[in-house]
Image (tube, grey):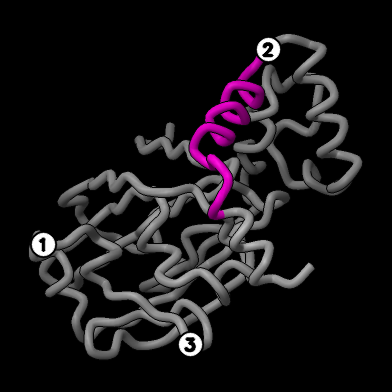
C-alpha cells in the first residue's frame, strides 16, 4: 500500500477517539493490560531500558511510566560551554533557516511559523530570521524534553488539533502536518535570544505534560 493511500486512511480514522483509548490503556494499572503492553514493547525494543534510571520493567506501574522513563544520572552529559543543545533524543528530520516566515516540513511541503505558534498573536515575529530543527522521536526514544538553552519561559500555549501520524511517510504526504496536529508551544526569551520549543502530538501519543523536573 502506498504512503499516500495510508495517509488518506489515517485522515479518515477517528484519531482523537482512538488516541484517547490508547491514553487510557497506557495508564492502566491492571496487570492484564499493563503486562502485555510492557512485554510487547520490550520484545520489539529489547534495549529500551539500557540507559534508564530504573532498568527493571516490573517497577513501572503503567506502560506510560515505562514509555516516559527517566534516564540514569550521567547518561546525557552536557558541554557546559555549549550555547544550544538538543532538547530530546531522536532523529533530526529537517534543519535550516526560516525563509519568508516558512518552515520546511518535507520536500514539497512547508508551513508558516505563524500557523505553528497559533497566529494571530504576534508570536511569530521574533523568529522571522531564525533557524529551526525538527526532531522525530521514535517509540523507543527517551520521551522527555529538556531546555535546549538557558532562557526565561515567557508563555506556554496549548493549540488543539488533529492527532495524525508524524512518521516520515506522513510528513511527505500530509500538508501542514505539524501545524494541524495538537501541540504545546513553549516560548522562551531574554536579552540575548528568542527560542520556541514546540511539542507536537501524534496518533497514539497525544498527551503532553509540562512542568519542572525534580
Relative vertical location of residue 127 with respect to residue 186 in this rendering, above or below: below
Camera-side residue of 82 and 87: 87
Q: Position of residue 120 (x, y in %)?
A: 11, 62
Please tell me which residue is depicted at 77% across the width and 17% down the height of the picture: 33
Q: Is residue 150 left or right of residue 127?
A: right
* Boundaries of the magenta span: 11-29
Camera-side residue of 152 and 137: 137
Residue receiving disc 1: 120
User: Do the residues under discs 1 and 2 have CB atoms within 8 angstroms?
Assistant: no
Camera-side residue of 204 and 64: 204
**Mark 1 or mark 2, which is nearer to you?**
1
Numbered mark located on residue 108 in the image: 3
128 inside magenta stretch: no
Q: Position of residue 66 (x, y in %)?
A: 69, 32
Q: Earlier in the sequence, mark 2 or mark 3?
A: 2
Relative vertical location of residue 130 with respect to residue 80 in this rendering, above or below: below
Please tell me which residue is depicted at 28% across the width and 44% down the height of the picture: 158
Q: Is residue 184 left or right of residue 173?
A: left
Q: CA distance from mark 3 to mark 1?
A: 25 Å
Relative vertical location of residue 198 with respect to residue 33 in this rendering, above or below: below
Secondary structure of the residue carrying numbered label 2 = loop
Residue receiving disc 2: 29
User: Do the residues under discs 2 and 3 have CB atoms within 8 angstroms?
Assistant: no
Amino acid at each position: 500500500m502506498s504512503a499516500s493511500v495510508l495517509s488518506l486512511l489515517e485522515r479518515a480514522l477517528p484519531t482523537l477517539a482512538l488516541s484517547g483509548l490508547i491514553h487510557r490503556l497506557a495508564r492502566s494499572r491492571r496487570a492484564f493490560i499493563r503486562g502485555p503492553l510492557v512485554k510487547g514493547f520490550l520484545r520489539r525494543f529489547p534495549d529500551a531500558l539500557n540507559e534508564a534510571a530504573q532498568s527493571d520493567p516490573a517497577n513501572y506501574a503503567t506502560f506510560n511510566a515505562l514509555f516516559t522513563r527517566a534516564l540514569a544520572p550521567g547518561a546525557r552529559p552536557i558541554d557546559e560551554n555549549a550555547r544550544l543543545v538538543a532538547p530530546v533524543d531522536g532523529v533530526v528530520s529537517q534543519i535550516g533557516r526560516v525563509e519568508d516566515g516558512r518552515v520546511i516540513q518535507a520536500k514539497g511541503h512547508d508551513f508558516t511559523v505563524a500557523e505553528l505558534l497559533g497566529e494571530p498573536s504576534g508570536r511569530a515575529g521574533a523568529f522571522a530570521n531564525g533557524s529551526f530543527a525538527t526532531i522525530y522521536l521514535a517509540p523507543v526514544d527517551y520521551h522527555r524534553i529538556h531546555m535546549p538553552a538557558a532562557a526565561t519561559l515567557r508563555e506556554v500555549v496549548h493549540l488543539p488539533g488533529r492527532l495524525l501520524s508524524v512518521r516520515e511517510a506522513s510528513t511527505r504526504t500530509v500538508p501542514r502536518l505539524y501545524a494541524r496536529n495538537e501541540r504545546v508551544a513553549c516560548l522562551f526569551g531574554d536579552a540575548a535570544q528568542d527560542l520556541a520549543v514546540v511539542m507536537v502530538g501524534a496518533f497514539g501519543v497525544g498527551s503532553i505534560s509540562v512542568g519542572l523536573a525534580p
